[in-house]
Amino acid sequence: MTKSGVPVRCPVCRRDHVYAPPSYPCACGAPVVPPVARGATVLPVTDRTWADEWVTVRCRMCGRRGQWPQPELGCACGAVLRIPVRSVQAPSGTPPTPAPPAPAPPAHIPLPRTAPTPRPAFQPVPVRTARDAVTVAGLYLRWLGYAEIRGAVKRAPSGVRVSARGVIALVEPSVQPTSLRDVECLWLSAMSDSVTCVCFSLAGYEERARARADALSVPLFVIDLTGTPQPVNSAATELIAAG
């Protein structure tokens, strides 16, 4: 599938841009490109909400509908522009395509060398901004088998939370290593909600944070600049193996 650029004018400084939306891998393996609404009004991002962070896009190959990051464009003037996307509507009389069921948890965690490989290879997204790191975390959770990625919420004092069915993840997109307090707060939130928790970081983890994560069996990943999460501890390796 080829991508063509669309003209975009910044409403703040009136600069003209040509924007080409990114593509994401569907569960069927085909690339999915958000359909940009040509001629629609482009607005600067001032506030972020869960609903604004994700758009529903239909795969042209299999018809499956999924949620993908809302396209955005950074202007040289400093404004972040939200690119409008055409809404997805099911044909008249056709029921919506059901989402694939979440995989049942395994009776045991298979060893990495004997684990089945039902998933296609993860397709990374290059990390250039903090939002790219959050996008990678959401895509990786989906690749691991977690359904209903619900978006991202900023959290003080650091990090961003991404949630899905049965899991919450902390994403630390700054140049500061993830702290002991961050790991403990995430684990307590997961215990309160009876879900799994996962950590993603660009700059790694403090020594005490990693030790506590090992003790609590919290999976830790480091996101490299290619957009590929790398497991840091055995809990992360086991999560990949279990799927």
Image: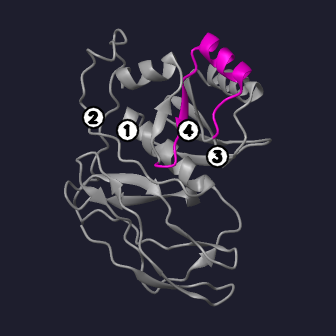
Residue at the image point whose x is 56% and y is 80% from the top: 42
| Labels 1, 4: front one | 1
Q: Which residue is denoted by mark 2 in the rendering? A: 119
Task: Measure the alpha-carbon separation of dots 2 and 1.
Answer: 7 Å
| Secondary structure state at the residue bearing disc 2 | loop
Q: 54 or 90: which is nearer to us?
A: 54
Q: CA distance from mark 1 to mark 4?
A: 14 Å
Q: Quadrant of residue 175?
A: top right
Amino acid at dot 1: Trp
Q: In the image, is 167 to the left or to the right of 242?
A: right
Query: Which percent across, then down, holds residue 62?
Result: 20, 54
Indicate whether residue 55 is drawn in magenta.
no
Q: Residue at x 73, y 26 (%)?
A: 185
Which quarter shows the C terminus?
top left
Q: Is residue 165 visible?
A: no
Residue positioned most to the right? 157
Residue 163, position in %: x, y? 55, 38
> For the residue marked with disc 3, what is the amino acid?
Pro
Compare marks 2 and 1 and give the one earlier in the sequence.
2
Residue behind mark 4: 163
- Pointer 1: what residue? 143
Boundaries of the magenta span:
203-226
Q: Amino acid at mark 4?
A: Ser
Q: Residues within 10 Å of mark 1 (few under 14, many from 20)?
A: many
Q: Distance of mark 4 from mark 2, alpha carbons?
A: 21 Å
Q: Residues within 10 Å of mark 4 (few under 14, many from 20)?
A: many
**Earlier residue among tags 1 and 4:** 1
Residue that carries the numbered disc 3 in the rendered image: 173
